Amino acid sequence: MDCPACKVPLIVAERDGLELDVCLQCHGMWLDAGELALLAEKFGRRLEAGGQAGLVKAQVEESPRPCPRCDKRMHKAWLGKPRVLLDSCPAGHGLWFDAGELGQVLSQFEVAAGSQPAAVIAFMGERIKGGDAT
């Protein structure tokens, strides 16, 4: 699979049973359908059923990017409050997060009782906090 943003091959990073497709150039991340919900659950975050139920179609000027799975033009969609602009495969294959966006989204979800909110940072490193780490 190639990065929809910069077109270089994505690498598969496996941590604690989750496979994440990551771009080493732009630090974007592809999550297959359902992986956002799994990631949220793993770190004690509550996410609406399906993991993408909160997506709202966005009307923006940004050019559409190709889905790394099927190459169809992805839709722009808002998720969360404050809103984070994501790319969503129209065929339901998954979501593309530019650098820092996954952390912005996960930090908004309600923390489940007894969870360790800092676990997300430990799992993903500084990149998830703001996207400015290399």
Image: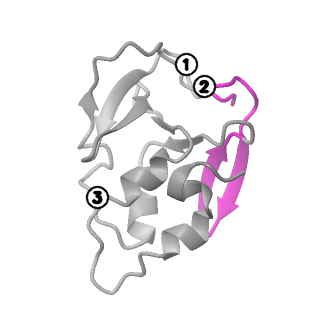
- Disc number placed over residue 66 in the picture, else none: 1
The residue at the point 60 percent across, 25 percent down is: 4
Residues packed near mark 1 inside 10 Å, few (<14), some (14 to 19) or many (20 plus) = many
Q: In which quarter of the image is the N terminus?
A: top right
- Disc number placed over residue 47 in the picture, else none: 3
Residue 79 lies left or right of residue 103; in this view the side is left
Q: Is residue 17 visible?
A: no
Query: In the image, residue 116 lies at what x, y percent?
Result: 42, 81
The residue at the point 48 percent across, 76 percent down is: 118
Q: Can residue 114 be seen in this view?
A: yes
Q: Do the residues labelled 3 and 1 touch (CB within 8 Å)?
A: no
Residue 63 lies left or right of residue 16; in this view the side is left
On screen, 111 above or below 71?
below
Q: Going from the N terminus, do you reach mark 3 or mark 1 first? A: 3
- Residues under labels 3 and 1: Cα distance? 26 Å
- Disc number placed over residue 52 in the picture, else none: none
Residue 63 lies left or right of residue 4; in this view the side is left
Q: Is mark 3 on a helix, strand or loop?
A: loop
Residues packed near mark 2 inside 10 Å, few (<14), some (14 to 19) or many (20 plus) = many
Q: Going from the N terminus, do you reach mark 2 or mark 1 first? A: 2
Amino acid carrying label 1: it is Pro
Query: In the image, residue 119 lies at what x, y percent?
Result: 50, 75
Give the magenta part as a residue range.
1-23
| Residue linked to disc 2 | 4
- Residues under labels 2 and 3: Cα distance? 25 Å
Query: In the image, residue 26 lies at what x, y percent?
Result: 67, 36
Q: Are marks 2 and 1 in contact (CB under 8 Å)?
A: yes
